[in-house]
Amino acid sequence: MSLDPVAAFVEARHREFRERVWAFCRDEIGGRRDPDSDAEARVRARELVGLMGAAGLFEPIQGGDVRGCLVAREVLAWWSPLADAVFALQGLSATPGLIAGRDPGGWGARAVAGEAMGAFAMTEREAGSDVASMTTRAVRDGDGYVIDGAKSFISNAGIADFHVVFAATDPGAGTRGISCFVVPADADGFEFAGAQVMSAPHPLGELRFEGCRVSADAMLGDEGGGFKVGMATLDRLRPTVAAGACGMAGRALWEAVRHARRREQFGRTLASFQLVQEKLAVSATELTAGRLLTYRAGWEKDNGAERITMEAAMAKSFATEAAQRIVDRAVQVLGGRGVVADHPVDRLYRAVRALRIYEGTTEIQHLIIGGGLVRDSGR
Protein backbone atom coordinates (compact mmCIF):
# COMPACT_ATOMS: atom_id res chain seq x y z
CA MET A 1 0.00 0.00 0.00
CA SER A 2 1.55 3.27 -1.14
CA LEU A 3 0.87 6.94 -0.52
CA ASP A 4 1.79 7.73 -4.14
CA PRO A 5 -1.78 8.12 -5.51
CA VAL A 6 -2.46 10.78 -2.87
CA ALA A 7 1.03 12.30 -2.87
CA ALA A 8 -0.30 15.76 -3.68
CA PHE A 9 -2.28 15.82 -0.43
CA VAL A 10 0.44 14.74 2.04
CA GLU A 11 3.79 16.01 3.28
CA ALA A 12 7.10 14.37 4.11
CA ARG A 13 6.11 14.07 7.78
CA HIS A 14 3.07 12.00 6.80
CA ARG A 15 5.22 9.64 4.75
CA GLU A 16 7.59 9.26 7.69
CA PHE A 17 4.69 8.69 10.06
CA ARG A 18 3.26 6.06 7.73
CA GLU A 19 6.53 4.14 7.97
CA ARG A 20 6.35 4.31 11.77
CA VAL A 21 2.79 2.99 11.82
CA TRP A 22 3.61 0.27 9.31
CA ALA A 23 6.62 -0.85 11.38
CA PHE A 24 4.47 -0.92 14.52
CA CYS A 25 1.84 -3.04 12.80
CA ARG A 26 4.43 -5.40 11.39
CA ASP A 27 6.03 -5.91 14.81
CA GLU A 28 3.01 -5.83 17.13
CA ILE A 29 0.13 -7.05 14.94
CA GLY A 30 1.71 -9.09 12.15
CA GLY A 31 1.24 -12.78 12.77
CA ARG A 32 -1.61 -12.17 15.23
CA ARG A 33 -5.10 -12.28 13.83
CA ASP A 34 -7.90 -10.31 15.42
CA PRO A 35 -9.73 -12.05 18.32
CA ASP A 36 -12.53 -14.53 17.69
CA SER A 37 -14.73 -13.56 20.64
CA ASP A 38 -16.07 -10.45 22.31
CA ALA A 39 -14.21 -11.24 25.53
CA GLU A 40 -10.90 -11.65 23.69
CA ALA A 41 -11.49 -8.43 21.74
CA ARG A 42 -11.94 -6.49 24.98
CA VAL A 43 -8.63 -7.74 26.37
CA ARG A 44 -6.77 -7.15 23.12
CA ALA A 45 -8.23 -3.65 22.69
CA ARG A 46 -6.88 -2.65 26.11
CA GLU A 47 -3.49 -4.04 25.18
CA LEU A 48 -3.45 -2.13 21.92
CA VAL A 49 -4.24 1.21 23.57
CA GLY A 50 -1.08 0.97 25.66
CA LEU A 51 1.09 -0.29 22.82
CA MET A 52 -0.13 2.32 20.36
CA GLY A 53 0.21 5.11 22.88
CA ALA A 54 3.77 4.12 23.78
CA ALA A 55 4.64 4.09 20.07
CA GLY A 56 3.28 7.62 19.64
CA LEU A 57 0.56 6.59 17.20
CA PHE A 58 -2.00 8.91 18.79
CA GLU A 59 0.15 12.02 18.34
CA PRO A 60 -1.82 13.31 15.30
CA ILE A 61 -4.97 13.41 17.46
CA GLN A 62 -3.35 15.78 19.95
CA GLY A 63 -1.89 17.90 17.18
CA GLY A 64 -5.12 18.14 15.20
CA ASP A 65 -3.29 16.64 12.22
CA VAL A 66 -6.16 15.13 10.26
CA ARG A 67 -3.95 13.69 7.53
CA GLY A 68 -1.81 12.04 10.20
CA CYS A 69 -4.97 10.43 11.56
CA LEU A 70 -5.89 9.30 8.03
CA VAL A 71 -2.50 7.66 7.58
CA ALA A 72 -2.77 5.91 10.95
CA ARG A 73 -6.25 4.53 10.36
CA GLU A 74 -5.55 3.40 6.79
CA VAL A 75 -2.47 1.43 7.82
CA LEU A 76 -4.01 0.06 11.03
CA ALA A 77 -7.16 -1.07 9.20
CA TRP A 78 -5.02 -2.85 6.58
CA TRP A 79 -3.52 -4.95 9.37
CA SER A 80 -6.32 -5.12 11.95
CA PRO A 81 -9.88 -3.73 12.02
CA LEU A 82 -9.74 -3.91 15.81
CA ALA A 83 -6.60 -1.76 15.97
CA ASP A 84 -8.29 0.70 13.64
CA ALA A 85 -11.29 0.86 15.98
CA VAL A 86 -9.02 1.48 18.97
CA PHE A 87 -7.47 4.47 17.20
CA ALA A 88 -10.90 5.77 16.16
CA LEU A 89 -12.23 5.74 19.72
CA GLN A 90 -9.17 7.46 21.18
CA GLY A 91 -9.76 10.17 18.60
CA LEU A 92 -13.47 10.46 19.32
CA SER A 93 -12.94 10.67 23.07
CA ALA A 94 -9.98 13.08 23.07
CA THR A 95 -11.08 15.46 20.31
CA PRO A 96 -14.14 17.01 22.04
CA GLY A 97 -11.89 18.38 24.78
CA LEU A 98 -9.45 19.74 22.21
CA ILE A 99 -12.30 21.50 20.42
CA ALA A 100 -13.75 22.85 23.67
CA GLY A 101 -10.32 23.89 24.92
CA ARG A 102 -10.73 21.95 28.17
CA ASP A 103 -9.52 18.62 29.49
CA PRO A 104 -11.42 17.74 32.69
CA GLY A 105 -9.42 15.33 34.80
CA GLY A 106 -6.66 15.24 32.19
CA TRP A 107 -8.44 12.33 30.51
CA GLY A 108 -7.83 13.57 26.98
CA ALA A 109 -4.08 13.86 27.51
CA ARG A 110 -4.00 10.41 29.07
CA ALA A 111 -5.92 9.01 26.09
CA VAL A 112 -3.38 10.41 23.63
CA ALA A 113 -0.56 8.93 25.72
CA GLY A 114 -2.27 5.53 25.66
CA GLU A 115 -2.67 5.62 29.44
CA ALA A 116 -6.47 5.68 29.37
CA MET A 117 -9.15 4.34 27.05
CA GLY A 118 -12.10 6.53 26.09
CA ALA A 119 -15.64 6.12 24.78
CA PHE A 120 -17.93 8.45 22.85
CA ALA A 121 -21.46 8.08 24.22
CA MET A 122 -24.03 9.81 22.03
CA THR A 123 -26.19 7.03 20.56
CA GLU A 124 -29.28 5.62 22.26
CA ARG A 125 -31.62 2.82 21.27
CA GLU A 126 -34.16 5.32 19.94
CA ALA A 127 -31.75 8.13 19.11
CA GLY A 128 -29.26 7.35 16.37
CA SER A 129 -29.18 9.74 13.44
CA ASP A 130 -31.92 11.77 15.16
CA VAL A 131 -29.70 13.08 17.95
CA ALA A 132 -32.32 15.56 19.18
CA SER A 133 -34.53 12.68 20.29
CA MET A 134 -32.10 11.48 22.96
CA THR A 135 -33.73 10.89 26.33
CA THR A 136 -30.67 10.98 28.59
CA ARG A 137 -31.03 14.00 30.86
CA ALA A 138 -28.59 16.12 32.86
CA VAL A 139 -30.19 18.30 35.55
CA ARG A 140 -28.35 21.07 37.34
CA ASP A 141 -28.02 20.31 41.04
CA GLY A 142 -26.01 22.71 43.15
CA ASP A 143 -22.44 22.88 41.87
CA GLY A 144 -22.86 19.96 39.48
CA TYR A 145 -25.22 17.94 37.30
CA VAL A 146 -27.10 14.69 37.77
CA ILE A 147 -27.32 12.46 34.70
CA ASP A 148 -30.05 9.87 34.16
CA GLY A 149 -30.61 7.72 31.10
CA ALA A 150 -28.99 5.08 28.94
CA LYS A 151 -26.71 4.84 25.93
CA SER A 152 -26.54 2.00 23.42
CA PHE A 153 -24.17 0.75 20.70
CA ILE A 154 -21.24 2.42 22.47
CA SER A 155 -17.78 1.26 21.45
CA ASN A 156 -15.46 0.47 24.38
CA ALA A 157 -18.45 0.19 26.73
CA GLY A 158 -17.32 -1.84 29.70
CA ILE A 159 -13.59 -1.28 29.18
CA ALA A 160 -13.26 2.52 28.83
CA ASP A 161 -11.74 4.55 31.65
CA PHE A 162 -13.76 7.64 30.76
CA HIS A 163 -16.73 8.55 28.59
CA VAL A 164 -17.68 11.65 26.62
CA VAL A 165 -21.41 11.70 27.34
CA PHE A 166 -24.10 13.75 25.61
CA ALA A 167 -27.25 14.56 27.57
CA ALA A 168 -30.14 17.01 27.30
CA THR A 169 -29.93 19.87 29.79
CA ASP A 170 -32.90 21.62 28.14
CA PRO A 171 -35.08 18.89 26.54
CA GLY A 172 -37.41 21.36 24.88
CA ALA A 173 -34.62 23.09 22.94
CA GLY A 174 -33.78 20.22 20.61
CA THR A 175 -30.13 20.05 19.60
CA ARG A 176 -29.55 23.46 21.25
CA GLY A 177 -30.40 21.89 24.59
CA ILE A 178 -27.75 19.14 24.50
CA SER A 179 -24.63 19.37 26.66
CA CYS A 180 -21.45 17.30 26.76
CA PHE A 181 -19.78 15.86 29.86
CA VAL A 182 -16.73 13.78 30.73
CA VAL A 183 -17.78 10.89 32.99
CA PRO A 184 -15.14 8.60 34.53
CA ALA A 185 -15.90 4.89 34.67
CA ASP A 186 -15.86 4.96 38.49
CA ALA A 187 -18.42 7.77 38.80
CA ASP A 188 -21.23 7.04 41.25
CA GLY A 189 -24.45 6.17 39.44
CA PHE A 190 -22.69 5.03 36.28
CA GLU A 191 -22.62 1.40 35.18
CA PHE A 192 -21.87 -0.83 32.25
CA ALA A 193 -25.22 -2.38 31.36
CA GLY A 194 -23.96 -5.23 29.18
CA ALA A 195 -22.18 -6.16 25.98
CA GLN A 196 -23.73 -6.03 22.52
CA VAL A 197 -21.88 -8.72 20.60
CA MET A 198 -21.02 -8.06 16.96
CA SER A 199 -20.29 -10.61 14.24
CA ALA A 200 -16.81 -9.08 13.92
CA PRO A 201 -15.56 -9.01 17.55
CA HIS A 202 -15.48 -5.39 18.70
CA PRO A 203 -16.09 -4.03 22.24
CA LEU A 204 -19.63 -2.65 22.07
CA GLY A 205 -22.29 -2.28 24.71
CA GLU A 206 -24.81 -0.32 26.73
CA LEU A 207 -24.29 2.23 29.50
CA ARG A 208 -26.68 3.25 32.25
CA PHE A 209 -26.82 6.45 34.29
CA GLU A 210 -28.92 6.49 37.48
CA GLY A 211 -28.39 9.62 39.52
CA CYS A 212 -24.87 9.90 38.13
CA ARG A 213 -23.41 13.07 39.59
CA VAL A 214 -20.63 15.03 37.88
CA SER A 215 -19.17 18.43 38.67
CA ALA A 216 -19.88 21.48 36.53
CA ASP A 217 -16.20 21.37 35.52
CA ALA A 218 -16.89 18.07 33.75
CA MET A 219 -18.78 19.90 31.01
CA LEU A 220 -17.08 20.35 27.64
CA GLY A 221 -18.11 23.65 26.10
CA ASP A 222 -21.09 25.70 27.24
CA GLU A 223 -24.38 24.40 28.55
CA GLY A 224 -26.46 23.64 25.48
CA GLY A 225 -23.33 23.58 23.32
CA GLY A 226 -22.80 19.83 23.39
CA PHE A 227 -24.31 19.20 19.98
CA LYS A 228 -21.95 21.76 18.46
CA VAL A 229 -18.96 20.07 20.12
CA GLY A 230 -20.14 16.64 18.96
CA MET A 231 -20.73 17.69 15.36
CA ALA A 232 -17.39 19.52 15.19
CA THR A 233 -15.73 16.34 16.44
CA LEU A 234 -17.43 14.21 13.80
CA ASP A 235 -16.69 16.80 11.12
CA ARG A 236 -12.98 16.53 11.90
CA LEU A 237 -12.87 12.76 12.30
CA ARG A 238 -15.40 11.56 9.72
CA PRO A 239 -12.73 11.40 6.96
CA THR A 240 -10.81 8.99 9.17
CA VAL A 241 -13.69 6.51 8.87
CA ALA A 242 -13.14 6.70 5.12
CA ALA A 243 -9.43 6.07 5.70
CA GLY A 244 -10.23 2.97 7.73
CA ALA A 245 -12.48 1.77 4.91
CA CYS A 246 -9.67 2.34 2.41
CA GLY A 247 -7.30 0.33 4.58
CA MET A 248 -9.69 -2.62 4.75
CA ALA A 249 -10.40 -2.40 1.03
CA GLY A 250 -6.69 -2.20 0.25
CA ARG A 251 -6.00 -5.36 2.23
CA ALA A 252 -8.88 -7.18 0.55
CA LEU A 253 -7.64 -6.18 -2.90
CA TRP A 254 -4.10 -7.24 -2.02
CA GLU A 255 -5.34 -10.65 -0.86
CA ALA A 256 -7.44 -11.04 -4.03
CA VAL A 257 -4.55 -10.19 -6.37
CA ARG A 258 -2.17 -12.50 -4.51
CA HIS A 259 -4.66 -15.35 -4.67
CA ALA A 260 -5.47 -14.76 -8.33
CA ARG A 261 -1.80 -14.92 -9.27
CA ARG A 262 -1.26 -18.20 -7.40
CA ARG A 263 -4.50 -20.11 -7.90
CA GLU A 264 -4.76 -22.25 -11.02
CA GLN A 265 -7.99 -23.43 -12.63
CA PHE A 266 -8.46 -25.00 -16.06
CA GLY A 267 -4.69 -25.07 -16.52
CA ARG A 268 -4.06 -21.34 -15.96
CA THR A 269 -3.97 -18.81 -13.15
CA LEU A 270 -7.12 -16.97 -12.15
CA ALA A 271 -5.29 -13.72 -12.86
CA SER A 272 -5.14 -14.59 -16.55
CA PHE A 273 -8.93 -14.61 -16.88
CA GLN A 274 -10.38 -11.33 -18.11
CA LEU A 275 -13.42 -11.57 -15.83
CA VAL A 276 -11.12 -11.75 -12.82
CA GLN A 277 -9.00 -8.87 -14.13
CA GLU A 278 -12.16 -6.82 -14.54
CA LYS A 279 -13.08 -7.31 -10.86
CA LEU A 280 -9.57 -6.32 -9.78
CA ALA A 281 -9.55 -3.30 -12.08
CA VAL A 282 -12.86 -1.94 -10.81
CA SER A 283 -11.74 -2.46 -7.21
CA ALA A 284 -8.42 -0.70 -7.77
CA THR A 285 -10.17 2.25 -9.42
CA GLU A 286 -12.75 2.59 -6.64
CA LEU A 287 -10.07 2.33 -3.98
CA THR A 288 -8.00 5.08 -5.58
CA ALA A 289 -11.06 7.32 -5.92
CA GLY A 290 -11.96 6.74 -2.27
CA ARG A 291 -8.44 7.56 -1.13
CA LEU A 292 -8.35 10.76 -3.17
CA LEU A 293 -11.63 11.95 -1.67
CA THR A 294 -10.39 11.02 1.80
CA TYR A 295 -7.04 12.76 1.67
CA ARG A 296 -8.57 15.76 -0.10
CA ALA A 297 -10.84 16.25 2.93
CA GLY A 298 -7.88 15.96 5.30
CA TRP A 299 -5.84 18.41 3.24
CA GLU A 300 -8.66 20.97 3.34
CA LYS A 301 -8.95 20.75 7.14
CA ASP A 302 -5.20 20.85 7.77
CA ASN A 303 -4.90 23.89 5.51
CA GLY A 304 -7.28 26.02 7.50
CA ALA A 305 -10.82 25.09 6.44
CA GLU A 306 -13.13 25.83 9.39
CA ARG A 307 -15.53 23.08 8.35
CA ILE A 308 -15.18 20.22 5.88
CA THR A 309 -18.73 18.98 6.17
CA MET A 310 -19.27 18.38 2.45
CA GLU A 311 -15.79 16.97 1.82
CA ALA A 312 -16.03 14.64 4.83
CA ALA A 313 -19.50 13.43 3.83
CA MET A 314 -18.37 12.66 0.27
CA ALA A 315 -15.28 10.82 1.49
CA LYS A 316 -17.12 8.82 4.13
CA SER A 317 -20.06 7.83 1.96
CA PHE A 318 -18.06 6.89 -1.13
CA ALA A 319 -15.14 5.15 0.56
CA THR A 320 -17.24 3.01 2.89
CA GLU A 321 -19.67 1.94 0.16
CA ALA A 322 -16.78 1.21 -2.20
CA ALA A 323 -14.97 -0.77 0.50
CA GLN A 324 -18.00 -3.00 0.92
CA ARG A 325 -18.00 -3.73 -2.81
CA ILE A 326 -14.23 -4.27 -2.95
CA VAL A 327 -14.27 -6.73 -0.06
CA ASP A 328 -17.23 -8.55 -1.62
CA ARG A 329 -15.37 -8.89 -4.94
CA ALA A 330 -12.35 -10.21 -3.06
CA VAL A 331 -14.52 -12.92 -1.52
CA GLN A 332 -15.74 -13.82 -5.00
CA VAL A 333 -12.19 -14.07 -6.36
CA LEU A 334 -11.07 -16.21 -3.44
CA GLY A 335 -14.11 -18.47 -3.69
CA GLY A 336 -14.39 -20.92 -0.81
CA ARG A 337 -11.29 -19.58 0.89
CA GLY A 338 -12.96 -16.18 1.16
CA VAL A 339 -15.70 -17.47 3.46
CA VAL A 340 -13.53 -19.54 5.79
CA ALA A 341 -13.68 -17.92 9.22
CA ASP A 342 -9.93 -17.65 9.79
CA HIS A 343 -9.15 -15.99 6.45
CA PRO A 344 -8.40 -12.23 6.51
CA VAL A 345 -10.94 -11.52 3.79
CA ASP A 346 -13.76 -13.23 5.69
CA ARG A 347 -12.86 -11.14 8.72
CA LEU A 348 -12.85 -8.00 6.59
CA TYR A 349 -16.24 -8.96 5.16
CA ARG A 350 -17.70 -8.95 8.66
CA ALA A 351 -15.82 -5.86 9.86
CA VAL A 352 -16.35 -3.51 6.91
CA ARG A 353 -20.15 -3.47 7.11
CA ALA A 354 -20.32 -1.34 10.26
CA LEU A 355 -18.40 1.51 8.62
CA ARG A 356 -21.42 2.36 6.46
CA ILE A 357 -23.44 2.97 9.63
CA TYR A 358 -21.42 4.58 12.41
CA GLU A 359 -20.58 8.30 12.54
CA GLY A 360 -23.49 8.92 10.21
CA THR A 361 -25.00 6.43 7.78
CA THR A 362 -24.44 6.70 4.05
CA GLU A 363 -27.96 8.02 3.71
CA ILE A 364 -27.28 10.80 6.21
CA GLN A 365 -24.09 11.70 4.32
CA HIS A 366 -26.11 11.96 1.11
CA LEU A 367 -28.59 14.27 2.86
CA ILE A 368 -25.68 16.44 4.02
CA ILE A 369 -24.23 16.61 0.50
CA GLY A 370 -27.58 17.22 -1.16
CA GLY A 371 -28.58 19.84 1.38
CA GLY A 372 -25.28 21.63 0.93
CA LEU A 373 -25.67 21.70 -2.82
CA VAL A 374 -29.17 23.17 -2.56
CA ARG A 375 -28.04 25.86 -0.11
CA ASP A 376 -24.97 26.79 -2.15
CA SER A 377 -26.92 27.01 -5.39
CA GLY A 378 -29.03 29.81 -3.93
CA ARG A 379 -26.05 32.07 -3.22
Image: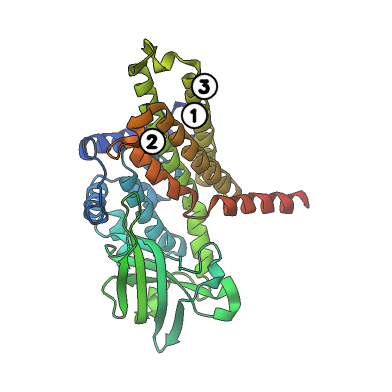
Query: Looking at this view, is 191 or 100 the one in front?
Result: 191
Q: Which residue is depicted at the point 38% across and 60% down?
A: 93
Cα gap from disc 2 to disc 3, whole angstroms: 36 Å
The residue where tag 3 is placed is 278
- The amino acid type of the residue labelled 1 equals Ser
Q: In the displayed structure, would residue 227 be above or below residue 259?
A: below
- The amino acid type of the residue labelled 3 equals Glu
Q: Residue 217's quadrant in the figure?
A: bottom left
Q: Position of residue 357 (x, y in %)?
A: 49, 53
Q: Is residue 344 visible?
A: yes
Q: Position of residue 73 (x, y in %)?
A: 38, 43
Tell me the quarter of the image containing the N terminus.
top left
Q: In the displayed structure, would residue 177 be above or below residue 52?
A: below
Q: Residue 205's quadrant in the figure?
A: bottom left
Query: Looking at this view, is 375 or 84 the one in front?
Result: 84
Cα gap from disc 2 to disc 1, whole angstroms: 29 Å
The residue where tag 2 is placed is 13
Q: Which residue is depicted at the point 60% across and 48% down?
A: 310
Q: Position of residue 150 (x, y in %)?
A: 40, 74
> Does 3 sit left or right of 107 as displayed?
right
Q: Is residue 17 visible?
A: no
Q: Which residue is depicted at the point 51% across and 59% down?
A: 232
- The amino acid type of the residue labelled 2 equals Arg
**Sequence-earlier tag: 2 or 1:** 2
Q: Position of residue 49 (x, y in %)?
A: 26, 52
Q: Which residue is depicted at the point 52% across and 36% down?
A: 290
Observer-side mark, 2 or 1, equals 1
Query: Looking at this view, is 124 or 122 the one in front?
Result: 124
Give SS at disc 3. Answer: helix
The residue where tag 1 is placed is 283
Instruction: Tell me, for residue 320, which label it has, or none.
Output: none
